[in-house]
């Protein structure tokens, strides 16, 4: 006969604590039914669910003596057999990963998110920090913080759950992403990006328009198109027509000064070292997408081709236009070419013409996007740089240290 007991060990962390307790239990041929361990700021919390021999005072005394010798505390909690059976039967319950991103994570952020989770019938199994250690004094603009919640259960109403999290995100100026914790999340293989206002922090056509002296007219049409107020292909033709006569040399001038979005270089360095396939699927222009391809090491590029005659822009785009529908189709073709499922694909964009692409991918991310895109995309990032996508993929800052892609404090 055995008693089910949860042993909670706590104290200053040091090598050998877990080994000492399990070696002792091993001498009595005790089964480990569940185990969990966490270390927060050098403080250990170790949990062991075991079946101790009933009424065996000697083993209890040995466990207490082991704790004393290691200068840690141990707590014995009886577990009812019915409770254990319920725990076993709960295997296979839905699980979700909630990722919280902010420049600095406040207690209020955790409280608000945890309350929404509880109110919608889910339980928090674990919380881990994915971001590196942050010094007490640091420029807030360079800080990025991320914690990941492992949730068990299924929300009473998925739409209301996501709406509640979106409300918290807006009120506290933080980003919150929720994904099903499936095998696909850990096996993404292809990531496709929009270019303008995603990989670069400008709209190339607006830069060309300034050089052509039609900046205001083009910018107005661009904004309408990104908000989804007019058809993208029509808006593109309208804007390019205004560029008629612009010298081809202006393309090189703009290409040499493309402003990369925060975190882009770190993101691509990580993706390339980890073997991900990357693509630019853009409603912009191939001239600039190919410049980024060389700079960042992008695998595939699909964008629109400006027609040039006698060294100047003709004011026309060569068909077919890469619009929303074509982006989504290109994404499917690339997944098929790479022999992967759409669940293994990530798509990132900011404008209305990216929505179909984001919906087609297993993980669609609206990045610093227009309101209509944030409302309709599966996930959104509005407060951090593009490399925060790595957190949604479960990649920690300390992984960057291992790969040597960024100078970070080890975790």
Image (tube, grey):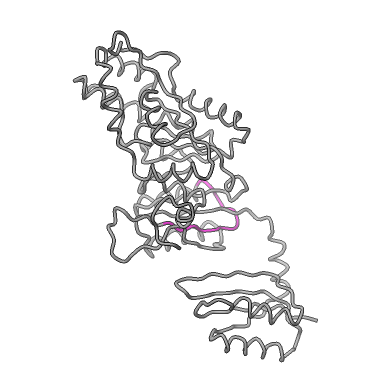
Indicate whether residue 330 is drawn in magenta. no
Closer to the camera in the image, 289 or 218: 289
Closer to the camera in the image, 219 or 406: 406
Residue drawn 68% across the image and 88% down it: 60
Residue drawn 70% across the image and 66% down it: 86
Q: Furthest residue to the top?
A: 310
Q: Looking at the picture, does residue 345 appear above or below residue 205? A: below
Q: Say left or right for 378 vs 62.
A: left
Q: Say left or right for 89 vs 406.
A: right
Total numbered labels placed on residues in the image: 0
Q: Say left or right for 241 vs 395.
A: left
- Expressed as whole percent of the image width and height from the top left, the position of residue 34 reads 67, 69
Closer to the camera in the image, 113 or 285: 285
- Expressed as whole percent of the image width and height from the top left, the position of residue 394 reads 52, 52
Magenta stretch in the rendered image: 146-159
Residue drawn 54% across the image and 63% down it: 126
Q: Furthest residue to the left?
A: 213
Quadrant of image for the C terminus = bottom left
Q: Say left or right for 140 vs 278.
A: left
Quadrant of image for the N terminus = bottom right
Residue drawn 54% across the image and 41% down it: 275
Quarter of the figure with residue 360: top right
- Expressed as whole percent of the image width and height from the top left, the position of residue 25 reads 70, 80
Indicate whether residue 147 is drawn in magenta. yes
Quarter of the figure with residue 219: top left
Q: Looking at the picture, does residue 145 appear above or below residue 15? A: above
Q: Furthest residue to the front?
A: 404
- Expressed as whole percent of the image width and height from the top left, the position of residue 226 reads 35, 29
């Amino acid at each position: 006969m055995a008693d089910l007991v949860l042993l909670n060990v706590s104290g200053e962390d040091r090598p050998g604590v877990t080994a000492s307790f399990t070696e002792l239990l091993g001498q009595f041929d005790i089964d480990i039914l569940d185990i969990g361990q966490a270390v927060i700021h050098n403080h250990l919390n170790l949990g062991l669910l075991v079946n101790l021999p009933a009424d065996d005072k000697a083993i209890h005394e040995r466990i207490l003596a082991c704790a004393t010798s290691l200068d840690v505390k141990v707590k014995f909690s009886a577990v009812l057999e019915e409770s254990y059976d319920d725990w076993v039967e709960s295997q296979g319950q839905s699980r979700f990963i909630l990722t919280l991103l902010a420049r600095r994570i406040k207690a209020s952020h955790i409280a608000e998110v945890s309350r929404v989770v509880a109110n919608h019938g889910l339980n928090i199994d674990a919380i881990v920090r994915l971001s590196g250690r942050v010094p007490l004094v640091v420029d807030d603009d360079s800080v990025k913080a991320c914690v990941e919640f492992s949730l068990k259960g299924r929300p009473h109403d998925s739409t209301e759950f996501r709406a509640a999290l979106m409300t918290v995100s807006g009120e506290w100026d933080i980003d919150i992403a929720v994904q099903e914790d499936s095998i696909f999340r850990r096996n993404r293989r292809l990531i496709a990006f929009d270019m303008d206002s995603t990989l670069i922090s400008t709209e190339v056509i607006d830069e060309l328009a300034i050089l052509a002296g039609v900046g205001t007219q083009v910018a107005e049409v661009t904004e309408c198109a990104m908000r989804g107020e007019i058809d993208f292909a029509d808006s593109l033709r309208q804007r390019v027509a205004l560029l008629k006569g612009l010298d081809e040399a202006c393309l090189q001038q703009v290409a040499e000064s493309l402003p990369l979005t925060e975190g882009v270089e770190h993101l691509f360095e990580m993706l390339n070292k980890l073997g991900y396939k990357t693509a630019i699927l853009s409603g912009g222009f191939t001239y600039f997408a190919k410049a980024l391809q060389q700079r960042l090491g992008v695998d595939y590029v699909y964008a629109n081709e400006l027609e040039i005659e006698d060294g100047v822009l003709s004011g026309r785009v060569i068909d077919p236009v890469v619009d929303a529908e074509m982006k989504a189709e290109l994404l499917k073709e690339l997944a098929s070419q790479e022999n992967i499922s759409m669940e293994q694909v990530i798509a990132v964009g900011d404008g209305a013409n990216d929505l179909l692409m984001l919906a087609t991918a297993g993980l669609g991310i609206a990045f610093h996007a227009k309101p209509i895109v944030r409302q309709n995309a599966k996930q959104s990032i509005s407060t951090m740089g593009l490399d925060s996508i790595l957190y949604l993929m479960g990649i920690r800052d300390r992984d960057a240290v291992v790969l040597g892609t960024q100078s970070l404090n080890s975790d």
